[in-house]
Amino acid sequence: MAVKLIASYSKRLGLPGFSSHQFSVSVETELTGVTDIAGESSRLYEALQSSVDQEIQQTGFVPTEAYGIEGKPSTPVARPNGRGEWKCSPKQKELIRQLIQDHSLDKGQIENLAQERFNLSLPELNKLQASGLIDELFRMTGGAPRQSRNGFPPKPQRVGGRQ
């Protein structure tokens, strides 16, 4: 009785710019009996893994961070650049700048705070990250607590289930 053994091995690797590449190999073989299925499976797995690992090292084309965005006339994406564009909202940008100015804060120190907290520069902070930085600036300066949209202080965050 012939036994058909099909084995495949696949690997996907993440690359810069939200890219990835994948390689897989499959093989089909016939065994003369069922006595050596485990041994043959192990041998095939090792051979396929070795082959994929060797070949996947050749990454080929790796897109840049701006790939697919460059030269498109669509809605501009807010990206920090030499022209001072920020990813957060204009109101958040203005509030951060106003807090720095009003409290004579060292802009370099605030930039370092953004780097420590979010691993990003001030202009690279998104709205949620900028909100967290603004809360920290209020704590540092003893400023007024943030208000929610309805004018009341935000509710404390619960941890876990219902209380």
Image (cartoon, rainbow, N blue to C red):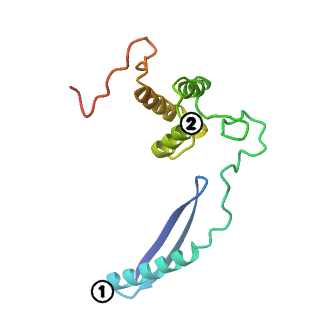
Q: Quadrant of the C terminus?
A: top left
Q: Is residue 59 left or right of residue 82?
A: left
The residue sitting at 37% across, 20% down in the picture is 154
Query: Upstream in the sequence, badge 2 or badge 1?
Result: 1
The residue sitting at 55% across, 37% down in the picture is 125
Q: With respect to residue 58, does 13 lie above or below?
A: above
Q: Residues within 10 Å of mark 2 (few under 14, many from 20)?
A: some
Q: With respect to residue 156, does 1 lie above or below?
A: below
Mark 2 and mark 1: Cα distance apart in space: 73 Å
CB-based contact (under 8 Å), mark 2 and mark 1: no
Q: Which residue is mark 2?
A: 107
Secondary structure type for disc 1: loop
The residue sitting at 75% across, 46% down in the picture is 70
Amino acid identity at mark 1: Thr
Q: Residue furthest front?
A: 104
Query: Residue 105, image x and y in percent?
Result: 52, 32
In the image shown, does 128 or 21 lie closer to the viewer?
128
Question: Which quadrant of the view contains residue 38?
Answer: bottom left
Query: Residue 117, image x and y in percent?
Result: 45, 42
Amino acid identity at mark 2: Lys
Query: Residue 15, image x and y in percent?
Result: 57, 60
Marks counted in the figure total 2
In the image shown, does 11 or 1 lie closer to the viewer?
11
Q: With respect to residue 118, does 147 lie above or below?
A: above
Residue 100: numbered disc: none
Q: Residue furthest left?
A: 163
Q: Residues within 10 Å of mark 1 (few under 14, many from 20)?
A: few
Q: Is residue 93 left or right of residue 150?
A: right
Q: Which residue is mark 1?
A: 35
User: In front: mark 2 or mark 1?
Assistant: 2
